[in-house]
Image: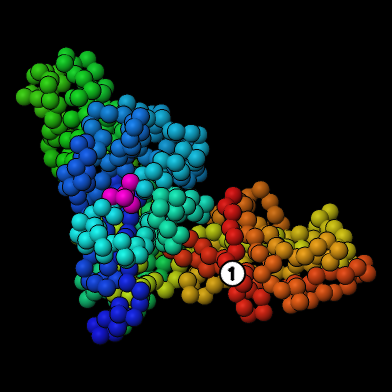
Amino acid sequence: MASRSDTNHSVQTMERAILVAMDYGTTFSGIMWAQTARPDVKTTIVQWPDSDGLLEARTSDKVPTEMIYDEDELRWGFMIKDDEARHQWFKLDLDPTHENEVSRLTINFPDPKALPPLYDGASGAVKLSTDYLSCLRQHTVNILKLKLGEGVVNSTPIRYIITVPAIWNDAAKARTQQCGIDAGMGLDIRIISEPEAAVVHALDVMDPHNLNVGDTFVLCDAGGGTVDLISYSVTRLEPKLEIREAVAGSGDACGSIFLNRIFRKYLVSQLEDVEGVGDDTVEDAMADFESSTKRKFTGEEKDVIIRVPGLADDAAKRIKRQKMTINTSVLKALFEPVIASITTLVKNQLKQTKMAKAVILVGGFGQSPYLRKCIEQIVGDAVEVLQPPHGWTAVVRGALIRALNEDVPGISRITLASRIARKAYGIRIASSFIGGAHESHRKFWNPFWGRYDVTTMKWFTEQGDEIDQEKPLVAHFLSTQLISGGPLNEHSVRLYSFSSRSNAKAPLYPCGDMSRLVKLTANLSSISTTLIPTKVGADGLPYYYLSFEIKVKFFSAHTEYSLWYKNKEYGKVNSEYA
């Protein structure tokens, strides 16, 4: 770790900036900021506007990820009154691959306060997410001006970090980044996966003396919408705590919003024939469940009490003095679908890690004592189940530490050495046809080479491979184009992915089991035509003959592609996700 003088020197010589980390959550979102000039001072935004629009009227570590459009204004978070319908859960629709889970939840457990999507597919989620992130950005700027002064804020660049679920595909992560750009956060937005941010915070607050090289632990980030799990192993203790992914991450859309909807359906069924019941009663009961019962339930209580304001005593419904008593066995049954999904994910990670020392729970639902107890029951005494301090805000805290450490090295004592590829990544290539090795019906004539070629897949990483963030993967390309066809302006190639639950080897030939991930377009016009060699093909015609590379760097939650020719970078490659 850098000494204090080293760190101060870094701060003084770099550009001064304000870093703002945003945990854009399904149900709640959090913000934390710091100045690179004072990286040890990190501040969580806890003041939020209320229904009257007062800037610092409500105090909370997070703000609801909800929004409503009025004729003349947009209201968000705590500005929305309890009885108003609102847009919610729109973040999940940024990744349509999970729309089946969300749709099933919406149909089976309807919420009368939830407004329908603006549009079908991801486009409505993009509009809502952009507007919501814009609200967060503007509120952040207003708070910064109060804390630092308008002059400082106006003269200091603000750089934003947004967290995303690890289980999302690359297109959804890129969509989130674009929403941030369109929300006015600038082009230099960093995207960090939620569990990777959370593990930085968790290890930062844990006692390092309890860790040894070789220790493996499972990080479970149980939030409102998604539950992400990744296993890490300790590879070094000094001079920094170095970890690497031990098992590829897993997860599902099984967060605590599912539990809220399940409880609402039960509540409505219990109270629908009770005299005096109305929407206000259900909303007050749901607020009590969300703020108290769900968070404090241990499973050891005999009964649980829920407030039901306005209802008369009813012995049959166990309602007395505007409170309803629910037997613990009933509440356990309501928790069961969500708990079962999460414990299954934990068991699968533990099965792959084999020698895990602990399960670390973070996220809003990760603070549930009942979830902790259920996980303790399945893992046994040999595996500890830990809930580090500030678990609800672990993601935003870790994201800020990660970002600060990139700008001011030495701020964090944790470094991630490598990740596990969740998929195989590859491209289609034309290679010389070999009889007996290739299927003959796939061959085609290549006029430049004067031979039969066959289209195969070239996989430059397999599912389960260890990927070093500091060492980009290199894909070699050869572009041949008739000179008579005009300048060689660009070269496009599609990047494909392949994954298998059984870790089957990626296929030799293109097939329906692959997914089109991204279209990469390299701008070759930046390379002078005088530098591009020419060759006469087997057909006697002159061709441009350009051999170049596309380097791929995998980061926490995004991928960068760059074009290289003769060991010189010619800029970033444009990527268009499928």
In the image as oriented, which residue stretches furthest toward the right? 540
Q: Is the magenta stretch mostly helix, strand or loop?
A: helix
Tell me which corner region of the image, top left, top right, bottom left or bottom right, holds residue 159.
bottom left
Tell me which corner region of the image, top left, top right, bottom left or bottom right, holds residue 110.
top left
Residue at 31% from the left image edge and 61% from the top image edge: 154
Residue 79 x/y as whole percent = 24, 38
> Which stretch appears magenta?
135-139
Residue 530 x/y as whole percent = 76, 77
Residue 438 x/y as whole percent = 79, 61
Instruction: Name the element at disc 1.
Output: strand
Residue at 50% from the left image edge and 34% from the top image edge: 120
Look at the picture and state if 459 lies above or below 289.
below
Judged left or right of residue 469, residue 485 is right
The answer to which of 489 and 340 lies nearer the viewer is 489
Residue 504 x/y as whole percent = 59, 58
Residue at 16% from the left image edge and 16% from the top image edge: 276
Residue type marked 1: Gly
Is residue 438 part of the magenta span, yes or no? Answer: no
Tell me which corner region of the image, top left, top right, bottom left or bottom right, holds residue 547.
bottom right
| Residue that numbered label 1 is attached to | 571
- Classify the position of the N terminus by image quarter: bottom left
Residue at 26% from the left image edge and 81% from the top image edge: 8
Look at the picture and state if 110 lies above or below 363.
above
